[in-house]
Image: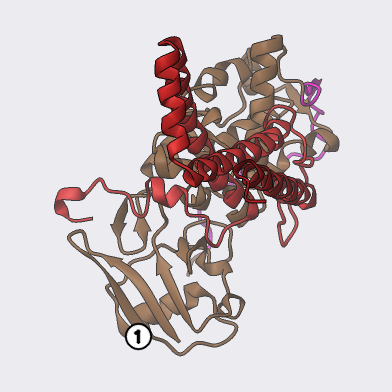
Chain colours: A brown, B red
Amino acid sequence: MKVRIRRYDGQKEWWQDYEVDVKSSDTVLDVLNKIREKQDHTLAFRLSCQMGSCGSCGMVINGLPALACQTRISELKTDSIRIEPLYNYKVIKDLVVDLNEFVNKHRSVKPWIIRKNPEELEEAPIEFKVTPEQNLTFVQFDYCIMCGICLAACPTVAIDPLFLGPQALGQAYRYIADPRDEGFEERIDILDDSHGVWRCHFAGACSYVCPKGVDPAKAIQFLKKEILKYRLLHKKKAATKPAELVEKAPPPNAPKPPPFDFKFEGGV
Amino acid sequence: MGEDKKEKRYKTGLLRSLWPYNFNAERYSYTLHRITGVILALYLIAHVFEIYHFALGPVAWEQTIALLGSLGIWEKIGLWIIAGSALYHGANGLRLILNEVFGMLLGKPVLPEYPYTPTSLSRNQKIAIYVILAIVIALWIWAGLYLLEGLGII
């Protein structure tokens, strides 16, 4: 099979063609590994888990952003493959893109649980009670693996590089919808900004390419609704009832294990 | 991406944002919405300029009308494109208001299960898009016939 890859060495960019023997069960990542092992060891791409969990191998395959490890050759139904780095990103080398801006955008929306009384997160005797129904309101958006594919598909990121993007906005909603979170007012000025939530015009491309079914487009529309409710009606987020604070269950009356002895007894 | 252009991003910019090939129906709809929006914005500027001549007196107004009349069929074609743009932009705008302000047609948050079909792009959304397209095309054809009738062609 003919494989066409967009190369970049820091100086110039070019298309390079390879001829690779493939099996129908091979993924695009397998093909790239074959090229690097047998034909061209200078080819650069990211990989880690190779099972769609880490989000390292995001790239554009035949014009569509996807994870290389989850894209089977047989599913492409083409005689040749065209592989490019993710759109809208700065390229470091070949298929490796610079994810610094992406991670900074994610960090800027404060993707953690915020409590008005921070001691509640640290105090040991208290824990939060989240019912399965409450969990369902945000768990879909919690599946994000930060592969960055959604930003490569987003048409707004293409014209406004400062736009927070579907990943960060989706994660902002994930925490806002969390019944344990009280940080809506802390996040709203970041989200209700000229590069924030209103730059999304619901093209839905982010949800279309998301390899984990996170549906960031849906989260962004829900976020708009919550912001409008807050700004126009002065209503705070009421997606779910706040989580109850409950006393932590006492530990079971199990016998204490003996202290660990660091001394090595016996010998080799 | 040369040495002097290190900050350049790969395949980005206005044309890339308007290129929906390979993607979902919503992204095609997004492209059409943007293009029709630009057409309407340009029309609005031209229309304000046209009406401004009305304030300058009857002579200036008659001259403007005569100028537009001299365009012949091109004026009607322009009006037909503007009518189509207004119909699509308005109808699709209503869909977007339902989505963005009221959170409708998006489905509820669900537990993702393979093959991960996003509910925000599901059946309801597609039905809305195709119904809008059908209504707009029907009304656009009717507008075209109306304009041709005005020309005395039919």
Q: Residues within 10 Å of mark 1 (few under 14, many from 20)?
A: few
Instruction: Give the image location of residue A253, x and y in percent.
Output: 84, 35
In the figure, A239 relative to A146: above or below?
A: above
Left or right of residue A113, residue A162 in this image: left
Could you tell me if residue A184 is visible in this image?
yes
Could you tell me if residue A262 is visible in this image?
no
Q: Quadrant of residue A134?
A: top right
Element type where label 1 sits in the image: helix
Q: Residue at x 47, y 27 (%)?
A: B65
Instruction: Give the image location of residue B1, x and y in percent.
Output: 23, 55
Instruction: Give the image location of residue A212, x and y in percent.
Output: 64, 54
In the figure, A112 relative to B107: above or below?
A: above
Q: Quadrant of residue B82?
A: top right
Circle count: 1
Magenta part of the chain: A239-266
Instruction: Give the image location of residue B30, x and y in percent.
Output: 57, 45
Q: Residue furthest left?
A: B4
Left or right of residue A199, residue A211 in this image: right
For the residue pair A114 and B147, the one nearer the viewer reads as: B147
Left or right of residue B55, residue A257 in this image: right
> Which residue type carries mark 1?
Lys
For the residue pair A8 and A199, the one nearer the viewer reads as: A199
Q: What is the chief secondary structure element of the magenta stretch?
A: loop
Query: Which residue corresponds to mark 1?
Result: A38
